[in-house]
């Protein structure tokens, strides 16, 4: 792929590869529970080191000790939360990765079990037991992908259609008595009203983002 604007070949689609949003989620978590000083980061073992280093730096700026908790398969989730609980981390940041998208309900259940405020990229994470969700509106992106398919069916070449990325991010939080701030400060929250926030500026990445392909 040459670029997002001109992918070339037979590839176009939607890209959700925005690792900078993990850094933003950490900021939102800190804003919501200001007294936390240690956060566990659940991430896929395939994550490149530069992304992890960027999150480490963001954590240091916020005065947070970041605990890396790598996972390679869903069956490791329970053990990961046991390790998090033993480490003394106050909250959980869930990486924006397919591995966790398929396990979002289980993550929420475990966060409740160990009374850990958790934030994820998955919509309605707060309704399944998590404290916060913050991420791209994936359902809107699915709808927008239909427009790309329509263009291809009408004769457009896939490689001439720009790869699209989210133009907005959304968040929801709620006050839930099952969650607690481990330092005994009250957990900030709302009534789960949807909030639309501007998308952060995308930094230059060392490798091209993966593409959700709509035509081969």
Image (cartoon, rainbow, N blue to C red):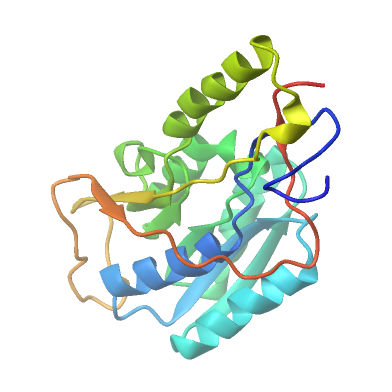
Q: Is residue 154 above or below residue 43?
A: above
Which residue ends up furthest to the top in the rendered image?
A: 153
Count of numbered circles on the image: 0
The quarter of the picture where residue 117 lies is: bottom left
Is residue 102 visible from the viewing direction of this image? Answer: yes
Q: Is residue 7 above or below residue 26?
A: above
Q: Position of residue 87 (x, y in %)?
A: 57, 73
Residue in front for this viewpoint, 30 or 111? 30
Q: Is residue 125 above or below residue 62?
A: above
- Please report the residue visible at 29 percent of the width from the left and 78 percent of the height from the top: 34
Instruction: Name the quarter where the C terminus is drawn.
Output: top right
Q: Position of residue 186 (x, y in %)?
A: 17, 70
- Please report the residue visible at 63 percent of the width from the left and 55 percent of the height from the top: 80
Residue in front for this viewpoint, 96 or 67? 96
Q: Is residue 131 left or right of residue 86?
A: left
Q: Position of residue 51 (x, y in %)?
A: 69, 69
Q: Is residue 51 left or right of residue 95?
A: right
Instruction: Name the quarter where the N terminus is drawn.
Output: top right
Residue in front for this viewpoint, 68 or 153? 153
């Amino acid at each position: 792929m040459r670029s997002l604007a001109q992918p070339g070949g037979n590839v176009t689609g939607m890209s959700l590869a925005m690792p900078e949003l993990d850094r933003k989620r950490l900021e939102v978590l800190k804003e919501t529970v200001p007294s936390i000083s240690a956060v566990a980061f659940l991430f896929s073992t395939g994550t490149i080191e530069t992304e992890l280093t960027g999150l480490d730096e963001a954590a240091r700026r916020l005065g947070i000790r970041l605990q890396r908790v790598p996972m390679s398969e869903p069956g490791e989730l329970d053990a990961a939360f046991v390790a998090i609980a033993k480490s003394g981390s106050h909250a959980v940041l869930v990486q924006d990765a397919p591995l966790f998208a398929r396990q979002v309900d289980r993550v929420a259940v475990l966060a409740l079990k160990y009374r850990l405020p958790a934030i994820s990229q998955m919509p309605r994470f707060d309704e399944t037991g998590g404290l916060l969700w913050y991420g791209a509106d994936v359902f809107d992106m699915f709808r927008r992908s239909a427009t790309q398919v329509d263009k291809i069916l009408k004769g457009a070449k896939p490689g001439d259609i720009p790869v699209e990325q989210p133009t907005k991010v959304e968040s929801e939080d709620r006050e839930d008595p099952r969650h607690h701030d481990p330092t005994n400060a009250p957990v900030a929250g709302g009534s789960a009203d949807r909030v639309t926030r501007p998308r952060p500026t995308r930094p230059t990445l060392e490798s091209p983002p993966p593409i959700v392909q709509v035509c081969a």
